């Protein structure tokens, strides 16, 4: 059952893909796979990511939260087990847009942010 936003609009709109590491450069630092998740909006990203950014459980995806807890337990003993970073595919000279990848205001979907 997909998680739903409290406002009833359904879960976040996103696409995801993954691939195995194929570089011969020897700079992969032991990482084997990459996952790219793209969101329709900054609000969808915030809802999906949840903690530590969104602190009120009513405003983040409970299924992704449970998944993070499950994966953390499996990977916690492995050095360098997960790297997470956000980036934008848009090129811009606007500092806000460059930093967030979106012209959506920071508070577009941040009701659970403390």
Image (spheres, rainbow, N blue to C red):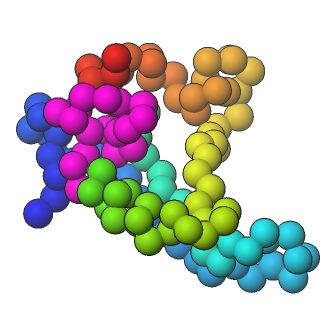
Quadrant location of residue 83? Answer: bottom right
Q: Is residue 79 magenta?
A: no
Residue 8 spot, x, y in % from top left: 9, 38
Residue 104 spot, x, y in % from top left: 44, 22
| 79 to 92, vertically: above or below | below
Instruction: State whether residue 109 appears in this view.
Output: no
Quadrant location of residue 94? Answer: top right
Number of marks in the rendered image: 0
Residue at image position (68%, 72%) is 31
Residue at image position (17%, 39%) is 5
Q: Nearer the viewer, residue 108 or 70?
A: 70
| 55 to 70, vertically: above or below | above
Residue at image position (21%, 49%) is 62
Residue at image position (24%, 29%) is 56
- Image quarter hosting the C terminus: top left
Does residue 42 appear to the left or right of 33 in the view shown?
left
Instruction: State whether residue 26 appears in this view.
Output: yes
Q: Magenta region: which residues?
A: 47-64
Does residue 12 appear to the left or right of 107 in the view shown?
left
Residue 20 spot, x, y in % from top left: 63, 81
- Image quarter hosting the N terminus: bottom left
Residue 61 spot, x, y in % from top left: 25, 46
Q: Which residue in the rendered view is the most extreme toward the right?
A: 25
Q: Nearer the viewer, residue 40 or 26?
A: 26
Quadrant location of residue 41? Answer: top left
């Amino acid at each position: 059952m997909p998680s739903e936003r409290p406002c009833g609009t359904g879960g976040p709109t996103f696409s995801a893909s993954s691939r195995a590491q194929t570089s011969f450069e020897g700079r992969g630092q032991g990482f084997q796979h990459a996952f790219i998740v793209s969101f329709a909006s900054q609000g969808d990203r915030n809802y999906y990511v949840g903690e530590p950014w969104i602190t009120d459980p009513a405003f983040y995806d409970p299924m992704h939260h449970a998944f993070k807890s499950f994966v953390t337990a499996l990977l916690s003993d492995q050095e360098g087990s997960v790297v997470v970073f956000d980036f934008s595919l848009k090129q811009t000279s606007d500092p806000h847009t460059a930093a967030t990848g979106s012209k959506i205001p920071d508070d577009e979907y941040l009701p659970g942010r403390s």
